[in-house]
């Protein structure tokens, strides 16, 4: 039976019914982080699918349930899309056991997107920690697809140990481009023998390395924007470091995550104070976050 | 003018028999598990006629406690066959609901599930709402927990109802019937013979208005609702000492959320095996610790009083900000039935600026 026939019984547009997607490629990023490259089972669904960089989806393994992941690929890539997740709970552990050719459910895309228009011509700082990298990685690729429209680019990615760094091959690829500053770092004690990256927490590395790049560009901090995602404690100190460097809160962009079920503003659990992350986010500027109730 | 006539007291609940005879599903106050609850009734004899507010709300007939959203079967050759919910939405009359529930379900829940502001309409709720005629009966004896007038409603408020029936007080009591929508007009035609004086009647309207006015005078519980919103809008007040003080005794049982007519939270869960089963939408509660627990172990609201703070915020701020609808209609169930007497109106009384001055929290 074709994919079209499989979906035909489902009421069109039903809010909670996913579409079927087939896993084309499983990439094991680290011992507990997996990337899926996927395409819709139904070719018409694939042709109709579009998303903006920074959006997310609900990925499901039938019998286990749904998980919320950022769409970690760039919308400039055609014919497939990706997600990247850490095995940390029941659904993600079961998903991680799937193989190429297996079929899962997908609902989305949901949420807002990065404001590319506002980024044009600016120097861009990306600071990601651990499994917070995928929502930054999609944006890096989007920016690189139209490199000439942006200024300097700095990518800082940190993890607890060298073995926890994801997208290492891609970081090497970006470094070879010659006009992207790529910095990998591990927490003190996480460096193996012969480690060629930095040792230090992401906020510290940002504060040590970014001012030099901005100075050489000579356009001032006011022409820069920073994007950060990672553990709450990391993003807190990244923001503090950026403020010390002269960044305004509206120049700092975060992509938040909270536990979600429906992703469409009904199930009631992703709110931070009065803000539903699924409806108004997941992408916010730091001044928007500062105005929220301290409920995260 | 919407007054369609009056119903004699002895024929009020015969409406159940008439509608049942016409094949319409009727939901009315009835005795279930020893409690007065909204349930499906097939005879006027099953109706509890002496009640203030059933223990549950009739939201469960539009937003069921548990319902299937899809069925999956793994195909031997790979992939899955998915089928949608395939529910039917029987024509239903809710008879004897109160104005607080009518506004909560017809306005607030509709704002969430209808997606007027954000899109993403939930067709399961909306199809049932479409198939439902809400025939409310005005309250004449509010109890000490009721506070609908504070929430801008009232014991005879028509919001969310297709028909409002109000018991008059002067002289021989009668029930005045007002049809408020095309569905309400159709209902009035359906019960035909039970309605007398099928014309505009100034006297009936005046007596109905007097009855509402008299009932409004019987409420005692109130607070400064605009002041509460101002208080909640200020992030600095999120750390107010009252939250821990008033909420520490909360046992996180969730009864306040399950009985609440505006609470809309649910979980999506898979029930079945890897090869076949279904995905269900099932009521959940912000009072349960697992509600917001991340797989990573991160927990935004680890303590019971923090979860109750979220509930207070939701009722008096989040609902308005996010869905442009009231989060509370003053039915009082969460006040009446909390096993440890956590009282949301106590929070509201302390949060509202006027009361804060009165009780000496602020000069």
Image: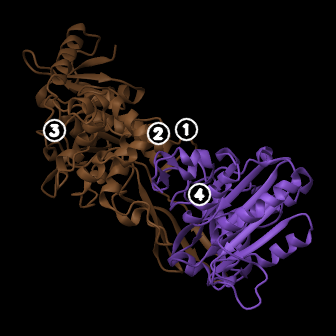
Q: Please report contact status of discs 3 and 1: CB closer than 8 Å, yes or no.
A: no
Kindly report the distance in space between the C-alpha atoms of the residues bearing marks 4 and 2.
Answer: 25 Å
Residue drawn at the location 54% of the way across and 58% of the way down: A16
Name the spot of residue A263 as percent of width and height, x first.
55, 56
Q: Colour of chain A?
A: purple
Q: Which residue is mark 3?
A: B52
Identify the residue position indicated by label 4 in the image.
A256
Q: Is residue A74 left or right of residue A85?
A: right
| Coordinates of residue B98 in the picture (x, y in percent) | 25, 35
Q: Residues within 10 Å of mark 2 (few under 14, many from 20)?
A: many
The reply to whether discs 2 and 1 touch (Cβ–Cβ < 8 Å) is yes
| CA distance for labels 3 and 2 | 26 Å
Query: In the image, residue A264 lies at what x, y percent?
Result: 55, 52
Residue furthest out toward the top: B202
Colour convention = by chain
> Which chain does the residue under circle 4 lie in?
A
Mark 3–mark 1 distance (CA, rounded to whole Å) = 34 Å
Q: Colour of chain B?
A: brown
- Closer to us: mark 3 or mark 4? 4
The chain carrying label 1 is B
Q: Are marks 2 and 1 on the same chain?
A: yes
Q: Which residue is mark 1?
A: B117
- Specify few, some or many for label 3: CA neighbours under 10 Å numbering under 14, 14-19, or 20 or more: some
Residue B134, placed above or below residue B120: above
Q: Residue at horizontal 55%, vertical 75%?
A: B73
Residue B272's mark? none
Q: Chain of mark 2?
A: B
Q: Name the one closer to the observer, A146 or B59.
A: A146
Q: Are marks 4 and 1 on the same chain?
A: no
């Amino acid at each position: 039976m074709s994919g079209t026939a499989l979906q035909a019984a489902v009421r069109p547009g039903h809010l909670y019914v996913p579409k079927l997607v087939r896993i084309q490629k499983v990439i094991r990023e680290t011992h507990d982080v997996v990337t899926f490259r996927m395409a819709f089972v139904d070719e018409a669904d694939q042709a109709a699918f579009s998303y903006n960089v920074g959006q997310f989806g609900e990925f499901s393994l039938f019998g286990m349930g749904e998980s919320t992941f950022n769409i970690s690929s760039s919308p400039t890539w055609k014919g497939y899309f990706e997600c990247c997740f850490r095995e940390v709970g029941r659904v993600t552990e079961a998903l991680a056991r799937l193989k190429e050719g297996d079929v899962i459910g997908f609902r989305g895309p949901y949420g807002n997107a990065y404001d590319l228009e506002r980024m044009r011509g600016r120097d861009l700082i990306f600071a990601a920690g651990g499994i917070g990298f995928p929502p930054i990685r999609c944006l890096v690729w989007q920016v690189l697809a139209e490199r000439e429209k942006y200024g300097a680019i700095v990518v800082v990615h940190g993890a607890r140990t060298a073995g926890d760094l994801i997208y290492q091959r891609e970081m090497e690829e970006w470094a070879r481009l010659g006009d992207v500053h790529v910095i990998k770092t591990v927490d003190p004690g996480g460096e193996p023998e012969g480690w060629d990256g930095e040792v230090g927490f992401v906020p510290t590395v940002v504060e040590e390395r970014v001012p030099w790049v901005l100075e050489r560009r000579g356009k001032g901090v006011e022409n820069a924007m920073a994007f950060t995602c990672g553990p709450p404690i990391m993003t807190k100190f990244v923001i503090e470091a950026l403020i010390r460097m002269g960044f305004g809160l509206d120049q700092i962009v975060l992509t938040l995550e909270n536990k979600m079920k429906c992703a469409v503003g009904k199930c009631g659990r992703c709110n931070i104070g009065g803000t539903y992350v699924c409806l108004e986010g997941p992408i916010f500027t730091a001044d928007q976050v500062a105005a929220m109730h301290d409920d995260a | 003018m919407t007054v369609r006539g009056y119903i004699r007291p002895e024929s009020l609940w015969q409406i159940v028999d008439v509608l049942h005879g016409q094949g319409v599903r009727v939901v009315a106050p009835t005795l279930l598990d020893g409690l007065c609850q909204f349930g499906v009734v097939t005879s006027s004899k099953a109706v509890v006629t002496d009640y203030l507010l059933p223990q549950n709300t009739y939201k469960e007939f539009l937003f069921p406690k548990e319902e299937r959203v899809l069925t999956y079967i793994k195909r031997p050759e790979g992939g899955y066959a998915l089928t949608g919910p395939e529910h039917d939405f029987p024509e239903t009359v809710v008879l004897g609901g109160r104005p607080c529930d009518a506004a909560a379900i017809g306005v607030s829940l509709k704002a969430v599930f209808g997606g007027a502001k954000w899109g993403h309409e939930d067709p399961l709720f909306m199809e049932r709402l479409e198939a439902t005629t809400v025939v409310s009966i005005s309250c004449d004896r509010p109890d000490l927990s009721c506070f609908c007038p504070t929430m801008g409603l009232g014991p005879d408020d028509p919001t969310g109802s297709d028909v409002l029936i109000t018991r008059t007080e002067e002289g021989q009591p009668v029930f005045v019937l007002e049809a408020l929508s095309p569905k309400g007009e159709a209902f009035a035609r359906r019960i035909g013979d039970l309605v007398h004086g099928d014309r505009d009647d100034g006297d009936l309207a005046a007596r109905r208005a007097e009855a509402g006015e008299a009932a409004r005078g019987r409420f005692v519980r109130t607070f400064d609702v605009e002041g509460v919103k101002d208080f909640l809008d200020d992030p600095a007040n999120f750390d107010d000492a009252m939250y821990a003080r008033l909420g520490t005794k909360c046992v996180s049982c969730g009864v306040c959320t399950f009985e609440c007519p505006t609470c809309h939270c649910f979980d999506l869960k898979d029930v079945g095996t890897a090869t076949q089963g279904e995905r269900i939408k099932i009521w959940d509660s912000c009072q349960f610790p697992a509600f917001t627990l991340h797989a990573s172990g991160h927990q935004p609201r680890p303590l019971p009083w923090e979860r109750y703070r979220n509930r207070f915020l939701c009722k008096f701020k989040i609902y308005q900000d996010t869905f442009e609808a009231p989060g509370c209609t003053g039915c009082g169930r969460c006040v009446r039935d909390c096993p440890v007497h956590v009282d949301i109106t106590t929070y509201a009384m302390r949060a509202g600026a006027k009361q804060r001055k009165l009780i000496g929290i602020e000069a």
